[in-house]
Amino acid sequence: REFYDVSTELFGSNDAGRVPTSLYVGKVDYSSYSVQEEIDRLVEALFDSDTIDETLGKEDWLAELRTFANLTGSFNFSADGKYLVGSSFIPALHLFLSQSQFKRFEDDIIFGENDNQTILFSRINFQHNQLGNSDKEINALETTQEIAETSTLEPQPFVVFFAYQFYDLNRIIVPQTVQGLLFALVAVLIICSVMLVHPFSVFMAALLLGMIIVNLLGSLVWWNIDLNSVSAINLTMAIGLVIDYSAHILHYFGTLDHTLSRRERSILALQEMGPPVFMGICTTLLGVIPLAFANNEIFRTFFRQFLTIVFVGGSHGMILLPVLLAYVGPSIPRNKTTKIAADLKASVTDAEV
């Protein structure tokens, strides 16, 4: 974004957000009428699309070759005079590439090793319109892909530029992030359903996780962080971190004597488990503080997100959770907690035997 802003300020809006791209064609019979006709169809379809800049033209070596051969007048064309066909195609191409004004096309045509009669790959270059935001980038990617997929050539041509990998990331980042969060949430809740004493404790853990995730997603806007691979990974990892700030207190609360009031059990749970949980929060924070002074944007993103994870997760686990437990915390009769402990001990003993 900063690059586009500076480019617009210094060079004007016409240069901002322009991205080159190329149509790649594999090993086909370039001297064939039908092949040249299909390549021309693809070129025109791309050129006429709303994502390609018509004002900057295209670098089409095949069209330039036909014009050159036609002016030369010594090569065979099809009956309708449109295409350079037959055995004269390769000689015409080599003569074409030997001309100084067409040297720029040498890198666009790849011949076979020790075989200058076979074209392995070729490309035709275009310029995209101004992109500048993810919606336009995704549209450019999908439009060029759809056009290339309509080709009847074999192998199928494709349109690509190295920046397309980032456009593809923008296309899939939201569903992939949601999927990752759901998988992590389900995994954590399955473990909580085994380790926590009461089903309502699992529900409270799920409620807290949902609230924390909403807060973390909102913090992306507050920190002006884009949803990308780095921030998505941090969001997914956050579920495993923040549950640690709540699960210990929930578990200890559930094991206390139910004859005590919820408020008393909440205080006891916080007194017993609060200090180690707080130490975990502090050590996590200390571990990421050096990243705040990094020059790399990725490291600074890690710091901002982990600072938010620690603050939001810690406040929910040590402030909100004890309050909720004091009002609606689950109660388990003492004999039932004793039976649960005995069953766990018996299962451990059986496993050791």
Image (cartoon, rainbow, N blue to C red):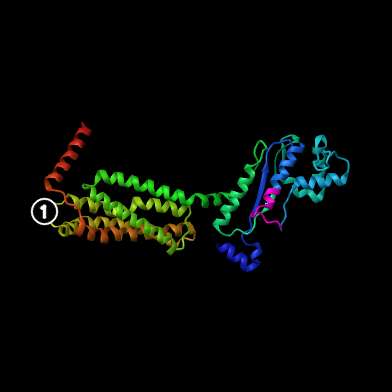
Residue 161 appears in the picture as rendered = no
Residue lying farthest to the front in this orientation? 80
At x 78%, y 48%, the residue is 103
Question: What percent of the width, then of the height, locates residue 304?
Answer: 41, 60
- Name above or below for residue 53 compared with residue 27: below
Residue 73 at least partly seen: yes
Q: Give left or right: position of 14 versus 104.
A: left
State the image quarter where residue 195 is shown.
top left
Residue 113 locus on image (x, y percent):
71, 35
Badge 1 is on which residue? 259
Q: Residue furthest right?
A: 73
Q: Position of residue 341 (x, y in %)?
A: 17, 42
Residue at left offset 35%, top offset 51% = 239
- Identity of the amino acid at label 1? Thr
Q: Which residues are magenta?
A: 44-54
Residue found 67% across the figure and 49% down from its top: 46
Task: Tell me where residue 259 appears, x and y as whole percent.
Answer: 11, 53
